Image (cartoon, rainbow, N blue to C red):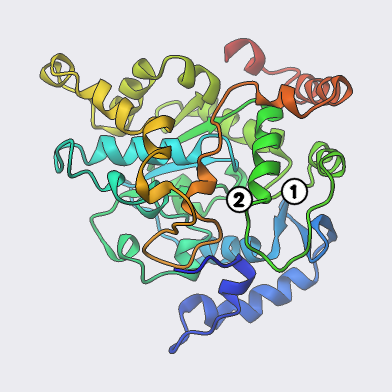
């Protein structure tokens, strides 16, 4: 299936209008009244809404999700900022929740990309409502990059559980920057790394500002740790086993003593590891996801997955700037001493 940008996908009419298409003009009228600023590409301006910056297709999707998505108490949400470990966490939650259905050789993760099994409510729900995972009433796994304070009311009020993963802002930027180069788009060339970094530090990035995004979910976790689990990418990469066990327990799918004795936790960790997923045929070359048009080839989601790759891209001045922003943002909270 040919890769397309979100703008291309939205511009493709369907035979019978979806709920999103019926409402899209209204969303666009709202967006036309909002502040716009230059983005990372000349034809992709950022739009300010709710204290965050959006690309227009994603903002249209947010407005649709806020109006139409109805979370159930039994649903489970993978929440994150882009490029902070989302693909890995989707794989883990799917493998944990479905481990009794498959053996080591039949798990769907071996054949398809993790994003096919945990749909985005601001992308899949509005644009691709007919994909199998959304039509499956038994599916309880959903995902989003939406900031906490803009989540659909039902997500917060239903009592459904949320796991949030965050990552060092320096590696997050580098991963976003390199990932953006792999997008198949007609929206123009990316600005330079230096200009993109300056915008990122100003909060001008998709779903940004990043640190506000993290802080919103941190506050939700502190207010109700029974509903929100807060994870750090770097800590999980260093020693995933205890965090996978903790995640499973939080999801309501805790590993039994017998499973632990049979190394089931280790098998889940290995199946969902960066190295395993990257080397699967489904995630190589220019292969796309099977269920709908894709913005990126599957391989784009597996670059390095390393901690500290920012050292190869950022100057000491850049590092000092972003570290200073982080100190300022979390001053007065226990975030920096608790993580």
- Which one is nearer the viewer's eye here, 208 or 180? 180
Whether residue 91 appears in this view of the structure is: yes
Residue 254 shown left or right of residue 331 in the figure: left
Q: Quadrant of the C terminus?
A: top right
**Mark toward the start of the polypeptide (1 vs 2):** 1
Instruction: Say above or below: 309 vs 72.
Output: above
User: Badge 2 is on which residue?
Assistant: 150
In the image shown, does 234 or 182 lie closer to the viewer?
Answer: 182
- Residue that mark 1 sits on: 51
Q: Secondary structure at mark 1?
A: loop
- Direction from residue 157 to residue 122 in the image, left or right: right
Is residue 145 shown left or right of residue 138? right
- Residue at x 71% of width, y 52% of height: 50
Specify the farthest residue to the front: 285
Q: Residue at x 57, y 64 (%)?
A: 61
Residue 162 visible in this rendered orientation of the protein: no
């Amino acid at each position: 299936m040919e890769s397309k940008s979100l703008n291309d996908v939205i511009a493709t009419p369907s035979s019978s209008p979806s709920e999103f298409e019926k409402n899209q003009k209204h969303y666009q009228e709202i967006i036309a009244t909002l502040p716009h600023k230059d983005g990372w590409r000349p034809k992709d301006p950022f739009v300010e809404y709710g204290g965050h910056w959006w690309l227009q297709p994603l903002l249209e999707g947010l407005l649709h999700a806020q109006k139409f998505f109805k979370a159930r108490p039994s649903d489970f949400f993978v929440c994150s900022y882009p490029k902070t470990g989302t693909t890995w966490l989707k794989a883990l939650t799917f493998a944990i929740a479905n481990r009794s259905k498959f053996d080591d050789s039949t798990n769907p993760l071996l054949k398809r990309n993790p994003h096919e099994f945990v749909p985005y409510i601001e992308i899949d729900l509005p644009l691709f409502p007919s994909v199998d995972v959304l039509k499956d009433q038994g599916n309880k796994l959903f995902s989003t990059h939406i900031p906490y304070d803009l989540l659909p009311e039902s997500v917060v009020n239903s009592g459904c559980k949320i796991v949030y993963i965050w990552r060092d802002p320096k590696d997050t930027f580098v991963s976003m920057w390199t990932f953006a180069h792999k997008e198949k788009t007609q929206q123009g060339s990316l600005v330079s790394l230096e200009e993109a970094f300056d915008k990122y530090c100003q909060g001008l990035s998709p779903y940004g500002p990043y640190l506000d995004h993290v802080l919103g979910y941190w506050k939700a976790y502190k207010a109700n740790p029974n509903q929100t689990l807060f994870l750090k990418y770097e800590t999980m990469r260093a020693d995933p086993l205890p965090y996978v066990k903790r995640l499973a327990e939080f999801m309501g799918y805790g590993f039994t003593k017998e499973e632990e004795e049979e190394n089931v936790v280790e098998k889940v960790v290995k199946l969902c590891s960066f190295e395993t997923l990257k080397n699967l045929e489904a995630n190589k070359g220019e292969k796309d996801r099977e269920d709908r048009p894709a913005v990126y080839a599957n391989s784009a989601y597996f670059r390095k997955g390393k901690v500290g790759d920012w050292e190869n891209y950022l100057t000491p001045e850049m590092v000092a700037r972003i570290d200073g922003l982080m100190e300022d943002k979390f001053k007065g909270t226990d975030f920096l001493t608790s993580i």
